[in-house]
Image: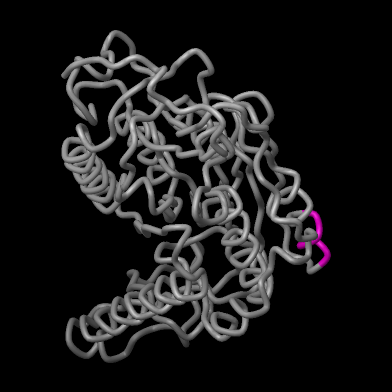
Amino acid sequence: MAKRHCSHVQPGRTLKQLAWFCPITPAYLFASPSVFPTNDRHRFMLGLFRRQSKFDAHAPTKKSGAGASDLVDPVVMDQIGHLELLSRTVVDGLLAGKHRSTTKGGCCEFAQHRQYAPGDEIRQIDWQVYARNDRYFVRQFEEETNLHAMLAVDSSGSMNFGLSTISKLDYARRAAACLARLLLHQRDSVGLTVLHESNSRFIPAKQHAAHLRTLMAALQSADASGEGNLSHQVQHCVARQRRRGLLVLLSDCFGDLDELATALRIARARGHDVVVMHILAPEELTFNFRRWSAFQSLEIASQRLHLDPPAVRDQYLQRMRTFLADLEEMVVGLGGDYVRMTTATDLADTLGWFLRNRMARRGLATNRGAVGR
């Protein structure tokens, strides 16, 4: 491909920013090696810009202007408030709730049979099993408990992008705020981790209603900047969770998928239920740019490319499709939930679909267990 000089970028235009994904690895190169260098493993989160603008690659995340309490959209809550976010796995908790516990108790949901041992209560003996096998077995039941949920919000530089919509970080903030409100309404415990390479913030899970203000303030103050290391940050977050529960990752997931898989595998091995909410801007999925443009990394200031978007669009879209398919396959293969979200999609519709689908699958699993018994 012939290389053109950046002087073709017309001066005096209003800045437009575009963050799009090009990890510099053989598996996810979005264009030919002649366009994108392959001598390192950094990824490009690129911003389309014009000269003479008040913005640059280091500009802070665009604030929506809303207060911390306004992150919880009443319209969204009106549509999802009657739904529940249920764990698909057993969890560790101290209070009564809606979720299956790792301990066995006296609740109504049957768990398993165990052979009778001296000291067991006679009333727990299953006499129907005794009639069939002439052996004593006691019934054990799942104890329902409250859920410990951790919302992990990516605040690396690539989350700063928002061209035709709000930024990905703003979308993640609002989604996390609504989920936190829903979980607290369920009497579950919820915490927050703002994932950042140098300025991470960890708020332990708590259950009281006043905790929502702490979470909202942390979300509102989050700023997308700098280079991300998602795998390392997720592993650090998991290591700080004392009880197994629910981990919800809100990120564009740009980076090495093998490393991210390692982090999520550790979370699953520790017994956490994992949900990946993959947040993208519509331009990242369409790459519908026509003019010769300069692309500036939103995470690494020294990385900049000059190219003709139509010349690489087909290759870009093919690589993006591969990336999306591989990420979804990885998350689902680990037993997690994958939810693709775009900043152009109504948040109420996306969260509503996710919650209804999750409740339906939880109910189906429970019904199958009852049939099996």
Point out residue 132 in the picture as x, y percentages from the top left corner. 17, 87
- Residue for point 58% across, 57% down: 149
What segment is highlighted magenta in the picture?
210-214
Of the pair 209 and 256, the residue shown nearer to us? 256
Q: Is residue 78 left or right of residue 362?
A: right
Give percent across and percent down for residue 167: 56, 49
In the image, residue 275 above or below residue 21: below
Residue 193: give x, y in percent of width and height. Answer: 63, 43
Between residue 202 and residue 47, name the one nearer to us: 47
Q: Residue at x 43, y 55 (%)?
A: 277
Q: Nearer the viewer, residue 122 or 290?
A: 290
Residue shown at 32% from the left, 29% from the top: 22
**Quadrant including the C terminus:** bottom left
Q: Main secondary structure of the magenta part?
A: helix
Residue 356 shown left or right of residue 329 in the figure = right
Q: On screen, 356 above or below 267?
A: below
* Residue 13 figure quarter: top right
Which residue is more in the foreground, 241 or 199?
Answer: 199
Query: Residue 250 vs residue 363: left or right?
Result: right
Q: Quadrant of the N terminus?
A: top left
Relative to 368, say whether 2 is above or below.
above
Q: How is the image coloured?
A: one colour
Is residue 211 in the magenta section? Answer: yes
Residue at (49% x, 49% y) in the render: 249
The magenta stretch spans residue 366: no
